[in-house]
Amino acid sequence: MPASLPFHPASRHSDATLAALFTAGYAGYYTPITLDAVGFRGMVTTGDIDLESSRVGALADEPVAFALLGVRGTRGWIGGMGVAATARGRGYGRAAMEAVIEAARGRGVKDVDLEVLEQNEPASRIYEALGFRDRRRLDVLVREPAPPAAGPAPDTAIEPLSVRECLNLYAALHSERGPWQRDLPSLEHWAPRLEGAGVRDALGIACWVLYRRDGKRLNIADLALARGRHRGLLEATLRVLIGAQPDSTLTLINIPADDPCGEILRHLGATAKFRQREMTLKL
């Protein structure tokens, strides 16, 4: 039997310590993640991570395991779970999840979501054993740098759009709740760094793409097509953005696998680099 691991609130540690622990927890992972203190604080802010309810486990005062909890009302989200390589194989991953779930109950959380890569079977087994159940599949779409293939010219001009105006219409153009990192509260946090482009017609905004430019990356934060509008409008908007930055890698994380907007991106050359299981635990 593994030795018991005491857990305490993550708020007891500095951002630098938590960033180092997060990086250690994802070392050797399918997609290693490296964070510094600034990056960690950004993740905490955009994901509404509650460090007081998040949990860290320590051996001889050395943090080795963690589970981060985002909280929005009665909704919760696991913003990351990991164990340092030197402490793996002792059941600490499950222990971290049990500790953070108990903390979520104490916060009045009723539902906890998370995402796990389909190939990450060890983590999936932990989540299934704890009662998490599949909600849907999410794709991480990537388009490698290249000019867009020729396509029909749009009937309506593509123009810059106010990010605030788009976010005010979010519920009207999205038929289901977005994954945590792309849901409206996350987009609100990202808003100062986002740009918007799309089509406006006589009925209002017909489609939009919200994005941020980060060096040679074009990160799509959200995209939407109003009911009854032709998909060619959104495709044309994406063509303009790609054409303006043909040497950039386009990314869009965690779009539902059956989302029609994802089909448009695939038509333009994006592929699913990873697929995740979005899972929910009812408390």
Image (cartoon, rainbow, N blue to C red):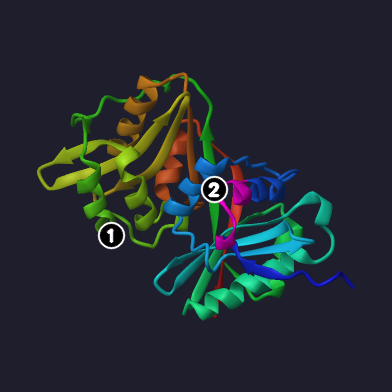
Please give the label number shown on residue 171.
1
Quarter of the image with the N terminus is bottom right
Q: How many marks?
A: 2
Residue drawn where x is 46% and y is 66% of the image: 71
In the image, which residues are magenta? 11-19
Chief SS of the magenta region:
helix
Q: Quadrant of the C terminus?
A: bottom right
Amino acid on which the number 2 mark rests in the picture:
Asp
Label 1, residues with CA under 10 Å away: few <14, some 14-19, many ≥20: few
Crowd class of label 2 (few under 14; some 14 to 19; many from 20; radius 10 Å) = many
Give the percent coordinates (x, y) of residue 227.
Answer: 25, 53
Residue corresponding to mark 2: 139
Which label's residue is closer to the chain start, 1 or 2?
A: 2
Which quadrant holds residue 30? top right
Q: Amino acid at mark 1?
A: Ala
Q: Nearer the viewer, residue 253 or 261?
A: 253
Q: Going by the image, does 157 lie left or right of 35?
A: left
Task: Check residue 5 in the rendering and tell me which mark sits there, or answer none.
Answer: none
